[in-house]
Image: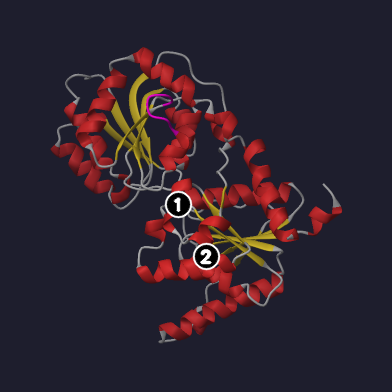
């Protein structure tokens, strides 16, 4: 740890720290940079319930305007938010701010203008969903080249943006959560099919229920466990009941020890319509689980998996394809084991000690440029 690193200050800017993939990546990166001797500050627009805890020593700043500042005019409120964020950068003087998710990236670029802070924008999800309208895409194409750096997670994402953005962008992976770095379980697999993710329409848990129902008589000893919570929990419960599988579908909710809960399962499912690079998928592969995942438009699944080598990749929304893939792996334990043993290799590829220095090198280069 040298004096130069001690003088560097990194800010992370995100909507909140509610428990999600992007938020966890930011908390992990903040922890890493602080451990490496950088000064770190976390700026969030809001504070919400059920958030990740920040490591000791990292300051948290809320950037939203207070109730006394709120105007009846949305335009006035917008400019007040811009100004407050600009003042935060002027006061904190970070060398670099990393932002992510939709409009946050625009805010970071605009509010760091006229300050010593260099903005690095990142697209962690499906680009088309983060920037769904023509207006937002035009803004991205205009503002992103003004940022000091651009981080994407998949090669497919380059094609969404203009050439200036695509040429400037770098691909940086997320590091693996250390809790999922462990020897692969090689004992007899428990007759459980598991999934981890927020219960919303995008995760398409209904597809899992339908495929499981189609195979319920062929594999009567198996259960389906969906970890997580969300607005569709009641709908999932009702759907399981309507399909006649309620007694074999379990919804444990949000748990702290996910790795221990799922590492002995027979099969892991990811059935999302869209994702960036799914942390849940990374973690399932790292545990060496036999995995079936949908090919999401961002290319996130493609970045992690090769169909038939370390898991099975199916089209998004294709219930019949999921049913066939589940039948293949449940009916052939040796093939499932082969895929799982190949999947666990991702531990080395995405180990924190390999990935985090990539982010550090990019940040240092950007700061010193």
* Residue 302 painted magenta: no
Q: Which residue is under mark 1?
A: 157
- Residue 49 coordinates in the image, percent (x, y): 46, 57
**Residue at position x 61%, y 52% in the image:** 54
Q: Nearer the viewer, residue 236 or 153?
A: 153
User: Over which residues does the magenta segment extend?
Assistant: 305-310
Q: Which residue is under mark 2?
A: 105
- Tell me if label 2 and label 1 are in contact, CB under 8 Å: no
- Residue 130 coordinates in the image, percent (x, y): 41, 60
Judge left or right: residue 306 versus residue 3.
Answer: left
* Residue 306 painted magenta: yes
Q: CA distance from mark 2 to mark 1?
A: 16 Å
Q: Nearer the viewer, residue 138 or 23?
A: 138
Judge left or right: residue 177 versus residue 209.
Answer: right
Q: Nearer the viewer, residue 44 or 114?
A: 114
Q: Which numbered disc, 2 or 1, marks the residue that appears first in the sequence?
A: 2
């Amino acid at each position: 740890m040298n004096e130069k690193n001690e003088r560097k200050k990194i800010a992370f800017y995100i909507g909140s720290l509610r428990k999600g993939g992007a938020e966890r990546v930011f908390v992990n990166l903040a922890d890493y940079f602080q451990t490496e001797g950088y000064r770190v500050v976390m700026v969030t627009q809001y504070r919400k319930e059920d958030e990740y805890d920040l490591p000791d020593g990292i300051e948290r700043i809320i950037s939203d305007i207070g109730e006394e500042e709120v105007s009846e005019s949305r335009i006035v409120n917008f400019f007040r938010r811009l100004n407050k964020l600009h003042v935060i950068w002027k006061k904190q003087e970070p060398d670099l701010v990393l932002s992510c998710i939709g409009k946050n990236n625009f805010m970071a670029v605009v509010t760091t203008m006229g300050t010593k802070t260099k903005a690095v924008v990142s697209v962690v999800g499906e680009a088309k969903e983060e920037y769904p309208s023509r207006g937002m895409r035009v803004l991205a194409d205009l503002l992103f080249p003004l940022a000091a750096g651009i981080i994407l997670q998949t090669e497919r994402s380059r094609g969404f943006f203009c050439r200036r953005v695509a040429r400037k962008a770098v691909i940086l992976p997320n590091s693996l959560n250390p809790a999922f770095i462990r020897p692969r379980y090689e004992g007899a697999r428990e007759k459980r099919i598991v999934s981890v993710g927020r219960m919303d329409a995008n995760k398409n848990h209904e597809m899992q229920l339908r495929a499981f129902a189609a195979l319920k008589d062929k594999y009567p000893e198996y259960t389906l466990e969906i970890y997580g919570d969300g607005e569709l929990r009641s709908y999932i419960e009702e759907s399981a009941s309507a399909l006649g599988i309620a007694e074999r579908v379990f919804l444990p909710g949000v748990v702290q020890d996910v790795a221990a809960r799922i590492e002995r399962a027979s099969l892991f499912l990811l059935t999302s319509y869209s994702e960036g690079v799914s942390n849940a998928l990374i973690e399932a592969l790292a545990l060496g689980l036999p995995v079936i995942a949908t090919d999401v438009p961002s290319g996130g699944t493609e970045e992690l998996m090769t169909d038939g080598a370390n898991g099975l990749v199916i089209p998004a929304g294709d219930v019949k394809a999921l049913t066939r893939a589940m039948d293949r792996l449940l009916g052939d334990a040796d093939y499932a084991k082969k895929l799982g043993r190949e999947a666990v290799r991702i531990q080395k590829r995405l180990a924190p000690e390999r990935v985090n220095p990539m982010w550090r090198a990019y940040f240092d280069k950007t700061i010193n440029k």
